[in-house]
């Protein structure tokens, strides 16, 4: 049984080996070629024969056939040739090349073969369009695309340590792709592109674009253009002096081809692909690549279907894409042109370039001075001749002493006002020189727009930062122009139109985009910004704090009554009257009271109810009117009543005399002392509570940590504070809430706080301290948090960074910064809040004065009533007295008449006695007549 099994296995293996051998013997692959000349046709044929004859070849039993033709310069003819002469042969791949004198790339060949999914291998086509797989899905090449030269640019910049360049390209497709790829490389390698200039293809004069280079700091120019455009640029650049000593021109291979070579500036550095012009070597590598890819497929037992053999067919080759992907993933380690490695698009990568230099304009050819390989540039020592014949490496930049400064209005660092009619901001400077104005241009945003004339673009700026700018310019030696931020913001990193790409806006974006050289404003230093721009040493240290409107309680007329509740006041008033009544009763019925003693002793006066009431109020108010009170004497009472009376003089005390009443008086005095002391202490407490206070305690206040629509707060959008809250995870809820209410400028937010549209505004401490000192209704809440500093912003690699930082440090040491802070920030118009007792004002005690005024008015009204009452009562008493006196006199006269009659007698006939007094008749006629009052014929009434 075992022998039988072994024999069967051996038989099966033999059959498999024989079958594979027969299959291999029948494999045949056709390789087509459309080449630039008959010479290269022979090279192609020899390369195919060499593979068939190579004893070490894995295809020992395979057969390769070669079909090659010369490529026509006519695209239509070349498309017909590839169909009739190449595809008709049933080839699996087509190798194509074109003459360097023919500017047209083999696009027709690629289109024809791509339709049938037949791989096309370009050995001289470097145009970027072939990397687009939506158009050329089966095209690959043994040479890199022109855009690969961006890596050589990067290698040269690294080698010479230049980190700031100017990108100058034409608008052709290849140059645009080189520029696009280099921008990505520059961003990843922290190389600053100061300016990108794109000029149209086919232009006859590029002076208008090139003149922009003169104002740039960088003098390293990366140039890419077609042969015709490069010729124009070189001629115009020479006329503008941009090719002189100090400038560096790094040009691509196509930029010095053909006629452009004659205009290439002396000292220019270019690049050229190694073996790029060696078509024979490229043909041999292409054939070897196809052979190795087919070997990998057959080794993996992946069979290929027969390729298309006629352009009249509409069916595509099913195995074409399989072969294409295998070709892309195949590496030729030891090719004639070096290591052949392709990327996913079928473009060659890791190519080797020669570094060339035009040492003299008289040289017919450029000199090879180095090499680019594996991302590194190697240059021979002092091999390069730079513009002007210099051998030392140029610095690569020119330091301009006239800087473009961007700022943003924000008190107290930058104020803005309308420019005077004279057009000179210096006319607004103060006599003492503390306020120095600088011309600034641009649009003003937010609340500050109300401060300037809207139809003018030029304004005058002044403040802390403007004074600092003037001092820096004098110290570091530069001139400047000032303009306002284009979008009115400090700058933050934001997505562009909802895409994944992010860009900086505001002042930071202007510096990054080379629109400005300096940022002189209240710009906070943070890590996010420091990755993109340079910062000087801080000129002002600060933190974040919170601005709120003080919670000022309104003072009412009854403020002096607030220490006690209304029910307590009513009880006190009731107690006064109850005690007075009880005092009166105790003294009235006590045997030792004034009421009893008043009957026995004339000098004692009884304690009446009004005196008891007076005593009760006097003790409560601590005025002493109840002690030693003075009672009226008899004469005074007579004077008050208006007539004489025999009231005896009596003096007494308006205080209770009985022991029982005095005990109650002492208890009442103690009660009054407690009430008055409690009132005084509670009034002081109310004054402390009445002091204006902030509505939040700080950043950890529940109103901030637990946001709600009833308590709105915000900061300035696209600012460092906004970024601070965005970065802090524990403050994410606050950041999300504030996004709905964030404002454009700090001035707008402060105005909203004043108008109660916002409850709190979170911003930089120097600004808020200044605002709180200017408006006493605003207050700072809580302690500082998020400490940082203000700095001068500059582009990465700016030559001014070190000098400006040293100047700022010098200003700190010499007291200049302290002087600026005293002038602009530390202006205290409001008294600082302290823990001392609050001072009473008219608003607190107005009710007391009104009460006194009411008392005066009541007194005046009462005295008028008293006078009227007294007059009315006095007139009645006078009439009554007169009537009484008249009656008494009448009675007296009657009695007198009767007496006289009895004494003198009367004649019987009624005739008076002639010797009797003559006045008797008058007395009889006027009984009121009194002879004692008759003087000189007149009489008076008494």
Image (cartoon, helix red, strand yellow):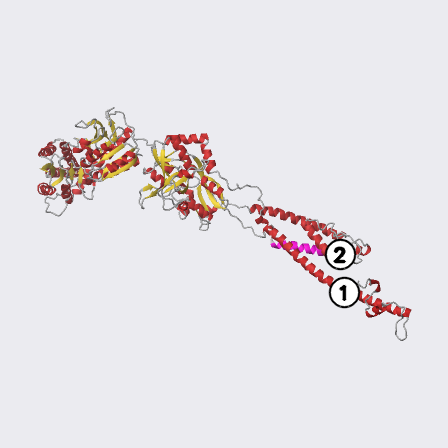
Left or right relative to 640: residue 201: left
* Quadrant in the picture for the C terminus: bottom right
Q: Is residue 158 visible?
A: yes
Work out which quarter of the rendered image holds the N terminus and state it.
Answer: top left
Q: Position of residue 750 (x, y in %)?
A: 45, 45
Give the mark nearest the N terminus, 1 or 2.
2
Observer-nearest of 533 and 697: 533
Label 1 to label 2: alpha-carbon separation: 19 Å
Report x, y in % for residue 696.
Answer: 49, 45
- Nearest the eye: 501 or 473: 473
Residue 339 vs residue 509: left or right? left
- Classified by dominant secondary structure, the portion drawn in magenta counts as helix
Q: In the displayed structure, would residue 473 be above or below residue 420?
A: above
In the image, is 33 to the left or to the right of 632?
left
Residue 97 screen position, x and y as percent: 13, 36
Whether residue 562 is visible to the viewer of this picture, yes or no, is no
Q: Could you say where residue 52 lies in the image, as x and y percent from the top left?
A: 11, 33
Residue range corresponding to the magenta coloring: 566-590
The residue where tag 2 is placed is 639
10 Å crowding of disc 2: few (<14), some (14-19), many (20+): few
Local secondary structure at mark 2: helix
> Quick one: which residue is furthest to the bottom in this view?
909
Q: Which secondary structure, mark 1? A: helix
Q: How many marks?
A: 2
Residue sitting nearer the eye, 184 or 492: 492
Q: Which mark is residue 419?
A: none
> Which residue corresponds to mark 1?
880
Q: Is residue 573 magenta?
A: yes
583 is within the stretch colored magenta: yes
Q: Nearer the viewer, residue 224 or 933?
A: 933
């Amino acid at each position: 049984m075992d022998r039988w099994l072994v024999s069967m296995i051996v038989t099966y293996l033999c059959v498999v080996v024989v079958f594979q051998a027969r299959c291999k013997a029948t494999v045949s692959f056709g390789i087509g070629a459309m080449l630039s000349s008959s010479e290269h046709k022979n090279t192609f044929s020899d390369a195919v024969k060499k593979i068939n004859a190579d004893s070490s070849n894995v295809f020992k039993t395979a057969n390769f056939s070669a079909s090659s033709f010369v490529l026509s310069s006519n695209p239509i003819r070349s498309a017909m040739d590839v169909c009739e002469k190449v595809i008709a042969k049933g080839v699996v791949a087509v190798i194509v090349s074109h003459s360097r004198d023919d500017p047209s790339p083999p696009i027709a060949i690629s289109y024809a073969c791509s339709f049938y999914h037949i791989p096309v291998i370009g050995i001289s086509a470097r145009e970027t369009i072939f990397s687009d797989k939506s158009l050329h899905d089966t095209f690959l090449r043994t040479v890199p695309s022109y855009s690969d030269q961006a890596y050589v640019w990067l290698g040269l910049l690294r080698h010479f340590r230049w980190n700031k360049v100017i990108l100058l390209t034409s608008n052709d497709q290849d140059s645009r792709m080189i520029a696009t790829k280099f921008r990505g490389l520059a961003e990843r390698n922290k190389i600053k592109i100061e300016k990108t200039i794109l000029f149209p293809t086919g232009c006859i004069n590029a002076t208008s674009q090139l003149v922009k280079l003169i104002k740039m700091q960088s003098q390293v120019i990366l140039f890419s253009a077609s042969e015709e455009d490069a010729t124009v640029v070189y001629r115009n650049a020479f006329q503008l002096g941009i090719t002189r000593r100090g400038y560096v021109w790094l040009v691509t291979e196509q930029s010095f081809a053909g006629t452009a070579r004659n205009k290439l500036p002396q000292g220019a550095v270019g690049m050229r692909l190694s073996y790029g012009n060696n078509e024979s070597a490229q043909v041999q590598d292409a054939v070897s690549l196809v052979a190795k890819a087919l070997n990998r497929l057959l080794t993996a037992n992946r069979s290929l279907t027969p390729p298309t053999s006629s352009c009249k067919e509409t069916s595509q080759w099913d195995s074409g894409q399989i072969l294409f992907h295998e070709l892309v993933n195949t590496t030729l380690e030891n090719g004639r042109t070096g290591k052949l490695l392709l990327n996913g698009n079928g473009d060659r990568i890791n190519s080797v370039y020669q570094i060339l230099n035009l040492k003299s304009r008289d040289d017919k050819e450029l000199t090879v001075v180095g090499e680019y390989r594996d991302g590194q540039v190697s240059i021979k020592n002092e091999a390069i001749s730079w513009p002007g014949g210099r051998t030392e490496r140029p610095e690569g930049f020119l330091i301009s002493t006239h800087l473009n400064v961007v700022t943003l209005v924000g008190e107290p660092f930058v104020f803005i006002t309308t420019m005077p009619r004279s057009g000179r901001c210096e006319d607004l400077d103060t006599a003492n020189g503390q306020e120095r104005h600088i011309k600034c241009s641009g649009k003003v945003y937010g609340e500050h727009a109300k401060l300037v004339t809207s139809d003018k673009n030029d304004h005058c700026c002044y403040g802390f930062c403007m004074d600092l700018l003037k001092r820096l310019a004098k110290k570091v030696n530069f001139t400047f122009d000032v303009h306002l931020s284009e979008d009115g913001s400090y700058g933050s990193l934001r997505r562009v139109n909802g895409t994944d790409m992010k860009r900086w806006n505001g002042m930071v974006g202007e510096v990054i985009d080379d629109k400005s050289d300096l940022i002189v404003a209240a710009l906070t230093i943070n890590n996010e910004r420091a990755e993109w721009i340079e910062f000087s040493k801080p000129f002002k240290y600060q933190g974040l704090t919170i601005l709120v409107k003080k919670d000022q309680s309104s003072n009412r007329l009854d403020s002096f009554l607030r220490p006690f509740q209304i029910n307590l006041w009513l009880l006190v008033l009731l107690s006064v009257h109850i005690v007075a009544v009880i005092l009166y009763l105790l003294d009235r019925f006590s045997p030792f009271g004034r009421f009893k003693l008043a009957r026995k002793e004339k000098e004692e006066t009884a304690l009446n109810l009004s005196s008891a009431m007076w005593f009760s109020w006097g003790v409560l108010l601590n005025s002493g009117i109840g002690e030693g009170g003075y009672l009226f004497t008899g004469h005074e009472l007579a004077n008050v009543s208006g007539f004489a009376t025999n009231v005896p003089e009596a003096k007494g005390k308006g205080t209770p005399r009985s022991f029982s009443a005095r005990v109650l008086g002492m208890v009442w005095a103690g009660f009054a002392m407690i009430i008055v002391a409690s009132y005084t202490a509670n009034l002081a407490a109310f004054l402390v509570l009445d002091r204006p206070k902030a509505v939040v305690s700080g950043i950890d206040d529940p109103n901030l940590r637990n946001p709600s629509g009833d308590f709105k707060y915000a900061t300035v959008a696209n600012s460092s504070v906004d970024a601070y809250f965005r970065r802090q995870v524990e403050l994410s809820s606050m950041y999300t809430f504030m996004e709905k209410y964030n404002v454009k400028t700090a001035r707008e937010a402060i105005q909203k706080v004043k108008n109660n549209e916002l409850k709190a505004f979170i911003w930089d401490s120097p600004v808020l301290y200044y605002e709180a000192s200017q408006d006493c209704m605003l207050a700072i809440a809580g302690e500082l948090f998020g400490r940082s500093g203000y700095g001068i912003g500059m582009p990465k690699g700016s030559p001014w960074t070190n000098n400006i930082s040293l100047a700022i440090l010098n200003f700190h040491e010499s007291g200049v910064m302290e002087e600026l802070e005293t002038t602009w920030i530390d202006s205290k118009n409001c008294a600082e809040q302290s823990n001392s007792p609050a001072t009473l004002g008219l608003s607190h005690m107005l009710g007391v004065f009104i009460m006194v005024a009411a008392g005066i008015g009541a007194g005046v009204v009462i005295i008028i009533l008293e006078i009227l009452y007294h007059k009315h009562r006095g007139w009645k008493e006078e009439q009554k007295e007169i009537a009484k006196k008249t009656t008494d006199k009448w009675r007296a006269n009657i009695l007198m008449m009767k007496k006289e009659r009895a004494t003198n007698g009367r004649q019987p006939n009624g005739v008076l006695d002639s010797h009797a007094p003559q006045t008797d008749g008058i007395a009889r006629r006027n009984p009121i007549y009194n002879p004692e009052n008759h003087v000189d014929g007149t009489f008076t009434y008494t």
